[in-house]
Amino acid sequence: MDTASRFVLIHGKNISHNTLAGSAAVPPMSIDKLFPALLECFGIILCGYIAGRADLITESQAKGLGNFVSKFALPALLFKNMVLLDFGDVIWAFLWSVLVAKVAVFVLVCVLTLMVASPDSRYSKAGLYAIFATQSNDFALGYPIVDALYRSTYPEYLQYIYLVAPVSLMLLNPIGFALCEVQKWRQSGHSQHRTLGIMGVVILQVLKNPVVFMVMIGILGHFALGQQIPAVLSEFIDGLANSFGGAALFYLGLTMVGQLRKLTRDTGVALILLITAKLLVMPLVCKDMVDILDVGVNSTSANHTSLSNFAFLYGVFPTAPSVAIYAGHYNMELEVVTSGMVISTFLSAPIMYVSAWLLTIPLMDPAPLVAELENVSFNISIVSLIALVWTIVVILLSRKFKRLPHLFALNLFLAQFLVCISMILWNSLVKYDDNLLGRTVTFTLLYSSLYSTYIWTGFNTTLPGSD
């Protein structure tokens, strides 16, 4: 490979493109399918939120939908995939890596909470916060994202979702439940804890979970049925399993209605730390554990790099709504858990999108890299344009733009608005039309918007009262 082919010129800068040995034979993630998948998932979530916010679906109806999703659709989906699972394609080092990463984050959050929390709620916070930081929304939100990224490149990664999920439910969550039971006994005034009673309640909580129960039944069916579902049951199970995706995302949107109102200033610090542990610490630890434990197994193949990237993306999956159910069951830390579930869900979308791109660029061919970056700019411009229109309308209707700080912010929003318009025009019209006038107008609009922020900042420093 010559020197020129290892660099890509982007906005006048040479960006090094280090191709891994043997990576040319390994297809990268299907990054072009990620944005449509995110738009599909969060669009359905938004529809559910709007339906709940507008009272189109009552609380009892939402509860019925949740029961259908958790007690019928999800068990059928788990049973189907566990029966059809091919254990021969599983890289067990990956599962061990995720297990170690989850245990490490669980212990870290639990110990720190026990050290700093007040004695009257120490154990409940430690248990629920540790569950919050380690239990991901694997099926409703995680599976569609993994399917979009790896269906055409590494389809075997899809089955890891069904193997990794029971790690939290069977090993870590019982510890959190036990801590919550201890707190419950302390609040009830008992001086001594009945260990057998606490263990019995914890075991019952675990066995009642449909994920744990159906994974165990599915594994038994895997060997008993010879990796094949009988034809008489196939259509029935497929019908229930296929109904899970949209219904689960819609129900997730319903559960978000009114949750942020429960957030108080006192719980803000705890919420920030929890989201940091879930969306930043967890993916980094998952990736590092794969890099460490998978050495000697897949280190000579490019699949090791892809598996490490997949572990990072898995760690970014937001917290599962079931954690809010646990908090409601024990009536402990409900404000932090429910608000954190909502915020982590919406923060995970941009983090997954940016992370997938950063992980994919080293594996991409230099030639289409610029075109792909233009597509990313186009996608981000569309999302930003919608948010900017909403923000600008709110500022104008509130009449706060007449004051200097808000006037300065309005200028920044308008400049970014024109930047988004310029990028959309470039990708929709100018890029495919050899029109010098159109290119000149778009270029002028883009860079005048960018540099107007510097000009406006300097202009404000000369205004009275700006010192």
Image: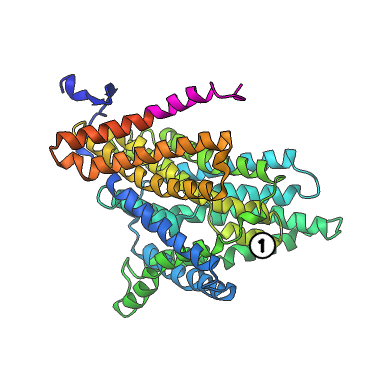
Give the position of the C terminus as an image quadrant: top right
Give the residues drawn in magenta, as a range.
451-467
Q: Amino acid at mark 1?
A: Gly
- Residue 107 visible within the image: no
In the foreground, 400 or 298: 400
Determine the image quadrant of residue 379: top left
Which residue is farthest top? Answer: 3
Determine the residue positioned at 20% across, 40% down.
430
Residue 313 in the image, given as x and y percentages of width and height: 41, 43
In the foreground, 309 or 218: 309
Residue 93 in the image, given as x and y percentages of width and height: 41, 42
Determine the residue positioned at 47% across, 73% down.
72
The residue singled out by tag 1 in the image is: 328
Determine the image quadrant of residue 10: top left
Residue 371 in the image, given as x and y percentages of width and height: 22, 37
- SS for dot 1: helix
Q: How many marks?
A: 1
Side of 322 where 430 appears, left or right: left
Relative to 118, does residue 162 appear above or below in the rendering? below
Queried whether the magenta region covers residue 419, the answer comes back as no
Residue 245 in the image, given as x and y percentages of width and height: 40, 64
Relative to 117, does residue 14 appear above or below in the rendering? above
Relative to 449, does residue 342 appear above or below in the rendering? below
Side of 46 where 272 appears, left or right: right
Question: Label 1 neighbourhood size at 10 Å, few (<14), some (14-19), many (20+)?
Answer: some
